[in-house]
Amino acid sequence: MAQTANPLVYKNFMIHLFVMIPAAVVMALFGREIDRILGLESFLEPPWTWIVAGALFALGALIVVYTYGYLTILGEGSPGTHVDGGPRKLVVTGPYTAVRHPSVLGKLSGVVGLGFLSGSTVFTFAIIPLLLVYSLITNRYLQERGCEDKFGDDYLRYRAAVPMLIPRPAGIRRFLAGRPAVELGEDR
């Protein structure tokens, strides 16, 4: 639990709070401006914009906080490899039994909530898919390569057993039963 006392761990949350969230808001406003130029109207009207956005924000925040906390405690390091090198242990339990990047699902939920709140067709249906593709590419070719280097064959077995983003029924059953995605080697 000493990891939670390390101030570097919270740097990842600060990056989201003061960089990524404001950047998403700017992109949503940009999308609204493009909508205005193109003559596109909001695709959802109040009060539904607030209801859907609130539900998606809450779900996204819950997923991100849960998965980052889970990874920080069990992985014994920051969830962000850019902060302190990331987790020191490979985590193959909890939300990581269903998908390799559960926090992406939380972030996606939050940004889609922003799309519904803004009512921007361009942001919701053009910019968000581009952001998702960018996130998946960087996760696969930057973050996962680091995991391959750090955790070796254990990570390769894990990656083969667990999908990147869309859970399979077997992964959901493992998560609900509290079983790991794979058995780790003796040295872990």
Image (cartoon, grey):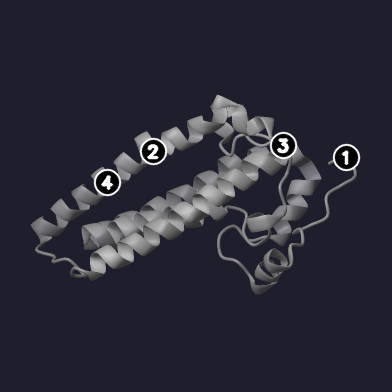
* Residue type beneath disc 1: Asp
Horizontal and vertical percent for residue 25?
Answer: 27, 46
Residue 163, relative to residue 12: is it above or below? below
Q: Which residue is mark 2?
A: 17
Q: Which residue is mark 4?
A: 25
For residue 38, say whether it is visible.
yes
Q: Earlier in the sequence, mark 4 or mark 2?
A: 2
* Label of residue 149 in the image: 3
* Residue type beneath disc 4: Val
Q: CA distance from mark 4 to mark 2?
A: 12 Å
Secondary structure type for disc 2: helix
Which of the two discs, 4 and 2, sits closer to the camera?
A: 2
Residue at 56% of width from left, 31% of height from top? 9
Q: Earlier in the sequence, mark 3 or mark 1?
A: 3
Q: Hey, which quadrant is residue 112 in on the image?
A: bottom left
Is residue 53 shown left or right of residue 38?
right
* Residue type beneath disc 2: Leu
Q: Which residue is mark 1?
A: 187
Which of the two discs, 2 and 1, sits closer to the camera?
A: 2
Is residue 89 shown left or right of residue 47?
right
Q: Earlier in the sequence, mark 3 or mark 2?
A: 2
Q: CA distance from mark 2 to mark 1?
A: 37 Å
Q: Earlier in the sequence, mark 3 or mark 4?
A: 4
Residue 123, relative to residue 151: is it above or below? below
Q: Are marks 4 and 2 in contact (CB under 8 Å)?
A: no
Secondary structure type for disc 4: helix
Q: Residues within 10 Å of mark 2 (few under 14, many from 20)?
A: few
Q: Residues within 10 Å of mark 4 (few under 14, many from 20)?
A: some
